Amino acid sequence: MKVFISYGATEDQVTALRLQALGVVNGLTIYVPPAHTRQGQQSLLEPQSAQKLREAEVILGVVVAGLSQACQAELNLAIGMGKAAIVMADPKFAPNLQPAFGPNLVVIDPANPASAELGIVQHLKAMNAHQSATQALLALGTLALGLLIFAPTE
Amino acid sequence: MRAPQCTIDSSCVIALDHLGFLPYLSLLFSQVLLPKAVREDLFKRRSTKNRVQAIFESLAFFKRCDDYDKGAVDFLLAEREREGSRDRGEVEAVVQASKFGATVIVDDAWGRELAARDDLQYHGTFWVLQRFYEFGLYSSADCRRNFVSLRNRGIRLPWTEVNAFLKSIKELPIEP
C-alpha cells in the first residue's frame, strides 16, 4: 500500500518521518516530501510530489506547527482526486482547513485526544474506500495522534 | 519532557547515509545537530561532497550547529594533535553535545572517551543499527546485509561485537 504524508510545516516533518518509519515496519510504502518544499512560498507542487501523490492510495495530512502553501496544494489535489484522506490538524488551523477539507479534517485537542480518535473512526466509517485503505488510515491516524500528543517538543 | 537531541560525527553520517537510514534517526532523536567541522569533513570527501546540502534540503530535523565553545574545542584539539590527529569533527560533536545536553553519535574511540569524560550519553553506528533492528525496520537477514554493505564500503565498526549481535539474531558472522 502506497501512502503520501503531507505535513504542514518543516517542524511537522519529524512526525511525518516517524510515521514513515513506523509504516515501513508494517509493510507500508510511505512518501514524505523533502523539507525544502516547506521553505519559502512554494505554491506549486514539485513534479516528484505530484507523481507520488497520484500513485498513493492513502493520504495523511499532519498540520500542527504551520500550514505551508505546498501542504495545502498537496491536500487540495488529494481531495480533488478523490483519494482516501485524513487531515489531522491542531485546533488553531481548523478554521482555515474546515472549508476545504470538511469531513476529512480531524482536529487534535491534546486535552481530549479521544475526540480525535472518534473523529478518525467516524470519518473512516463514512468513507467509501477499500478496506485496506481505511485500515492503513486508522493505523497511521492513531500513530500520528500518539506521536503528536506524547512526543516531547521542547 | 525535553526532546532528545544528538550531535553526530562524520563517519556515522556516512554509514547511515550509505544505507539510506538517516530519516530513521527521527525515531531516536527530534533533532540531529551537525557541527561545522563535521560538515566540512563531509564536504571535503568526494563521495559525500554533495550529500551535506541534500541532507539539509530533505530532512528538517538535521540542523547546522555552529554555536559552541571554540576555546574548549581548541583545547581538546591540542591534546588530540599531540597524538598525531587533526580531526576536529568528533571534538566539536562532543563540545556541542555538552552545551545542549545532547547524546553523541560517534564511532571514533577518542571521541567516545571525550564524551565519557563529560558524562555524556554516547553511542556509535552499531548501536543505532541495533535500535533500528529492534524497531523492526528490517529483518535479521537484511540486518546482516547492512553490516556487509558497510564493511564493503570500508566503514570501521566493532566487528567482534557486530558478530556477537549477528549470532544472537541467528545470522552468520561477517569476515572483518
Image: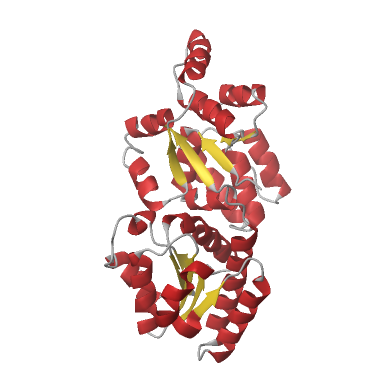
- Residue at 59% x, 57% y is B137
- Would you place residue A11 above or below residue B112 in this image? below
- Look at the image and tell me whether residue B176 can be seen: no
- Residue at 53% x, 52% y is B24
- Would you place residue A95 above or below residue A40 in this image? below
- Look at the image and tell me whether residue A32 can be seen: yes
Question: Which quarter of the figure has residue A123?
Answer: bottom right
Give the farthest residue toward the top.
B82
- Residue at 53% x, 15% y is B76
Question: Which quarter of the figure has residue B164?
Answer: top right
Picture mark count: 0
Point out residue A50 in the picture as x, y percentages from the top left corner. 32, 71
- Residue at 49% x, 52% y is B23
Point out residue A16 in the picture as x, y percentages from the top left corner. 50, 61
Point out residue A29 in the picture as x, y percentages from the top left corner. 48, 68
Q: Which residue occupies the foreground of this view, A2 or A90?
A: A90
Residue A101 horizontal side relative to residue B137, left or right: left
Point out residue B97 in the picture as x, y percentages from the top left corner. 56, 32
- Would you place residue B46 above or below residue B132 in this image? above
Residue A30 horizontal side relative to residue A51, left or right: right
Q: Which residue occupies the foreground of this view, B5 or B151?
A: B5
Question: Which quarter of the figure has residue B44?
Answer: top left
Q: Which residue occupies the foreground of this view, A43 or A36?
A: A43
Q: In this figure, which colouring scheme has been used for the structure? A: secondary structure
